[in-house]
Amino acid sequence: MRLRNRVEVLEKKDRGDFVPFVRIIQHEGQSEEEATAGHEAEHGPLGNCARILRVIIREPKALDASA
């Protein structure tokens, strides 16, 4: 029961000026501009957001077992 109360207090707490990070997924072969444009098309313009976490996803490379 104590954990439930603690969670309720945290959920009701005012976040003040907290600004979350914006996560932009950038796939291999995609430019930063393309990834940003795709994110903005789905989520709206970034404006002057200064907290951007850019995640670059690369295709896995096959391991050469003979080496």
Image (spheres, rainbow, N blue to C red):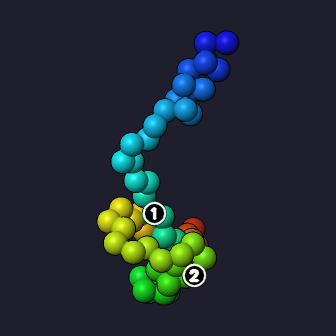
**Does residue 39 appear to the left or right of 53 in the view shown?**
right
The residue tagged 2 is 41
> How far apart, in angstroms, are the residues tagged by discs 1 and 2?
14 Å
Residue 60 sits above or below residue 38 on the image: above
- Crowd tier of the residue under label 1, counting other residues whose Cα lies within 10 Å: few below 14, some 14–19, many 20 or above: some
In the picture, the quarter occupied by the N terminus is: top right
Which element is circle 1 on?
Answer: strand
Looking at the picture, how far across and down is residue 26, in whole percent? 49, 76
Residue farthest toward the top in the current orientation of the protein: 1
Residue 22: x and y in percent read 45, 63
If you read the primary sequence from the N terminus, does the residue marked by circle 1 or circle 2 appear first? 1
User: Could you tell whether 28 is left or right of 4 in the image?
Assistant: left
Question: Who's the residue at 36% across and 68% down the image?
Answer: 49
| Res. 34 in view | yes
Element class at badge 2: helix
| Residue that appears at 49% across and 32% down | 13
Task: Find disc 1 in the rendering and name its residue.
Answer: 22
Q: Amino acid at mark 1?
A: Val
